[in-house]
């Protein structure tokens, strides 16, 4: 199986660090998050990876090279302008095989990639969205009123749980191809909704035992560094 890693974003939420450094190369201890992701993909049987790059792409090329030191073949797809989280697939759709993985280049996870691939095939899905349960806390007391502004209830700092997209997917080429074009901007939620509306089987996959974190915010990046330092073996394939 092949994989596409979206590594072209500017990482604006992590500025000023990402002004001179691409977010996928932000280090977790002694290892960039992109290297960890490449090693996890290789451990799940992926042999070829396409890196969709834009911002500071020469640094990513210099670090990853042809992929041989990771046991992979790496090729690059350069965006002349930002194409969104699914737009780069337009230029790659004829090269990425029947089923392929798409992932953001800035996530830290213990998700079982091999199990994901197997589940996608067993369910005969056209798209599999990896989801993670996150708790959302509101730091205020919520006042509930009726149409005449009479008090109906009071919720003190409520917390709710939601399934969120991890930025990790398995997609089937034939279902994706009608909706992407080279050089045309497209975000992944829009692609998935287009696929669903066209009758494709778009399913979600949850691994409750797994951990996931998007390193895009400074607080989450600090947490990711601590998690990787303390639990390195959880993230790296044997």
Image: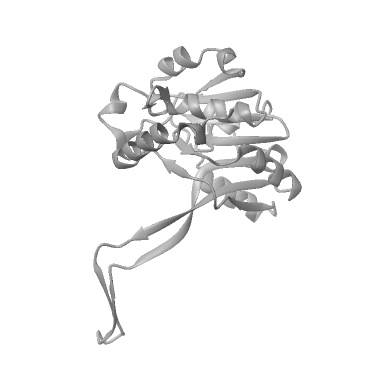
Query: At x 42% / y 28%, what residue is drawn?
Result: 24
Q: Quadrant of residue 225?
A: top left
Q: Position of residue 238 (x, y in %)?
A: 59, 28
Q: Quadrant of residue 11?
A: top left
Q: Position of residue 210 (x, y in %)?
A: 53, 46
Query: At x 45% / y 23%, what residue is drawn?
Result: 80
Query: At x 37% / y 26%, what residue is drawn?
Result: 29
User: Which color scheme does this rendered protein use?
Assistant: one colour
Q: Nearer the viewer, residue 84 or 154?
A: 154
Q: Nearer the viewer, residue 165 or 133?
A: 133
Residue 182 visible from this viewpoint: no
Q: Is residue 10 left or right of residue 113?
A: left
Q: Position of residue 188 (x, y in %)?
A: 53, 43
Work out whether 150 lies above or below 59.
below
Work out whether 48 lies above or below 139.
above
Q: Position of residue 66 (x, y in %)?
A: 56, 13
Q: Nearer the viewer, residue 180 or 2?
A: 2
Work out whether 174 lies above or below 192.
above
Query: At x 28% / y 67%, what residue is drawn?
Result: 157
Quadrant (top left/top right/bottom left/bottom right) for the N terminus: top right
Q: Quadrant of residue 14?
A: top left
Count of residue discs: 0
Residue 125 visible from this viewpoint: yes
Q: Is residue 75 left or right of residue 54?
A: right
């Amino acid at each position: 199986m092949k994989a596409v890693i979206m590594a072209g974003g500017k990482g604006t939420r992590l500025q000023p660090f990402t002004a001179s450094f691409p977010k996928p190369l932000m280090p977790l201890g002694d290892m960039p998050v992109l290297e960890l992701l490449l090693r996890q993909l290789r451990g799940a049987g992926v042999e070829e990876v396409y890196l969709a790059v834009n911002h500071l792409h020469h640094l990513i090329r210099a670090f990853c090279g042809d992929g041989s030191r990771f046991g992979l073949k790496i090729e690059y797809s350069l965006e002349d302008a930002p194409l969104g989280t699914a737009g780069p697939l337009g230029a790659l759709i004829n090269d990425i095989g029947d089923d392929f993985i798409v992932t953001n280049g800035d996530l830290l996870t213990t998700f079982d990639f091999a199990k994901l691939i197997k589940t996608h095939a067993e369910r005969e899905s056209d798209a599999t969205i990896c989801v993670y349960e996150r708790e959302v806390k509101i730091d205020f007391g919520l006042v509930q009123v009726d149409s005449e502004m009479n008090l109906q209830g009071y919720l003190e700092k409520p917390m709710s749980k939601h399934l969120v997209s991890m930025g990790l997917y398995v997609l089937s080429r034939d279902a994706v191809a009608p909706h992407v074009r080279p050089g045309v901007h497209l975000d992944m939620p829009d692609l998935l909704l287009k696929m669903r509306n066209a009758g494709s089987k778009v399913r979600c996959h949850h691994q409750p035992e797994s951990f996931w974190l998007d390193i895009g915010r400074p607080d989450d990046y600090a947490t990711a560094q601590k998690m990787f330092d303390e639990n390195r073996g959880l993230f790296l394939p044997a």
